[in-house]
Image: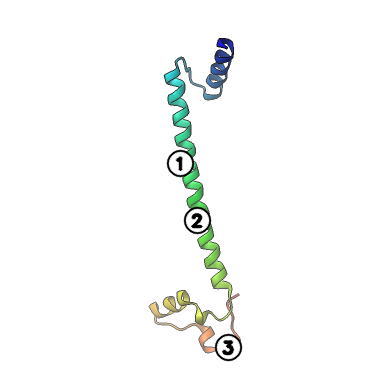
Amino acid sequence: MWLAAQDSLRQICEQSGDPLESIQQVTEHMQQLLERERETTVRRDEVAARKSDVEAQIERLSHPDGAEDPYLVTIAERFDGVLLSEIYDDITLS
């Protein structure tokens, strides 16, 4: 049993590149790895949410007749303009 534990400790030391000589050091190292993994997961989820938002926006903007899109209407109003799709029926946003 002791030999197996020592072999595992040696493998962890090789993988981490740190000289882990006590159970406390091993525990601290594992906690640091878990914290990094949590941070990476949070960042991944944030990126996925942003990607989903952008894809939804692209989908919304790709539909014809942008005059019914509140986002585009707001932009046109903000810049004192009109959407061409409000003037011409044959113009689509593609």
* Residue at the spot 52% in from the left edge and 84% down from the top edge: 84
* Residue at the spot 44% in from the left edge and 30% down from the top edge: 31
Q: Label 2 belongs to which residue?
A: 49
Identify residue type, mark 1: Glu
Label drawn at residue 68 = none
Q: Label 1 belongs to which residue?
A: 39
Q: Between marks 2 and 1, how big is the CA–CA gap?
A: 15 Å
Label drawn at residue 89 = 3
| Quadrant showing the N terminus | top right
Q: Examine the rendered structure and indicate whether residue 18 appears above or below residue 41.
A: above
Q: Secondary structure at mark 3?
A: loop
Q: Examine the rendered structure and indicate whether residue 7 appears above or below residue 87.
A: above
Q: Secondary structure at mark 1?
A: helix
Identify residue type, mark 3: Asp
Nearest to viewer (mark 2 / mark 3): 2
First-in-chain label (1 vs 3):
1
| Quadrant showing the C terminus | bottom right
Identify residue type, mark 2: Ala
Locate residue 78, reporting x and y percent.
Answer: 38, 77
